[in-house]
Amino acid sequence: MKNTTATQEAFIQTPLGVTSIQGDATGIVSVHVLKSDTVAPSVEIPDCLKEAVVQLQEYFSGTRRLFELKLNLKGTDFQKSVWQELLNIPYGKTISYLELSKRLGDVKAIRAAAAANGQNPFWIVVPCHRVIGSDGSLTGYAGGLWRKKWLLEHESPYKQQSLF
């Protein structure tokens, strides 16, 4: 009998680098961008990951604003509550780490919320990039601040036009 819950992995090329998608028949377990492009994109995509690949491609092409994937959140109850709250930040909007901790019901949990945000295993799908400093700064981002800046500009309703 074939094990349908064995974790599968696929690699896709995105504008921000090669991205790993892992999951099984019960859902996606992680999406993350690799630190280097030493892994080639997958030639074949496992069936259980095809929808995630399609939705990520749609996101990067600008035709998808909301992901509709079955996610297998694995973490502490607090981490899961942070990641669930991140899903409530609309496309093209940002909130501060302070606002995130307020939404979780404890302004004193700002550091814990920031740490859980940084441990989010679902790059882009659970939009941790939409959380910024209270002063509007792009503060910490596991994928690199240049990626966070790119993602926020990608989602911005105000596209910068070139004058030349």
Image: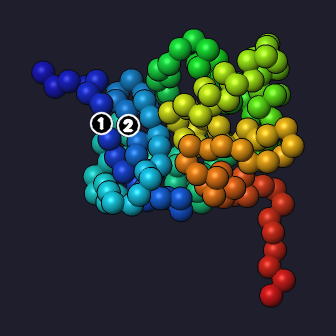
Q: Quadrant of the N terminus?
A: top left
Residue 122 pos. (x, y %): 52, 36
Residue 85 pos. (x, y %): 70, 24
Is label 1 in a helix, a strand or a loop?
strand
Three-letter amino acid code at disc 2?
A: Gln
* Direction from residue 145 to residue 53 in the image, left or right: left
* Direction from residue 3 to residue 128 in the image, left or right: right
Mark 1 and mark 2 lie on one chain; the one further toward the N terminus is 1
Structural crowding at the residue carrying mark 2, measured as other residues with C-alpha within 10 Å and reported as few (<14), some (14–19) or many (≥20): many
Is label 2 in a helix, a strand or a loop?
strand
Q: Nearer the viewer, residue 2 or 89?
A: 89
* Direction from residue 94 to residue 68 in the image, left or right: left
Residue 64 pos. (x, y %): 63, 49
Residue 145 pos. (x, y %): 64, 52
Q: Residue at x 66, y 21 (%)?
A: 112
List the residue tagged with mark 2: 22
Asked whether the beta carbons under mark 1 and mark 2 sit within 8 Å of each other, the answer is yes
Q: Nearer the viewer, residue 52 or 12?
A: 12
List the residue tagged with mark 1: 8
| Residue 53 in view in this figure | yes
Q: CA distance from mark 1 to mark 2?
A: 6 Å
Residue 47's quadrant in the figure? top left
Residue closest to the far left: 1
Q: Residue at x 39, y 23 (%)?
A: 26
Three-letter amino acid code at disc 1?
A: Gln
Total label count?
A: 2
Q: Is residue 34 above or below residue 72?
A: below
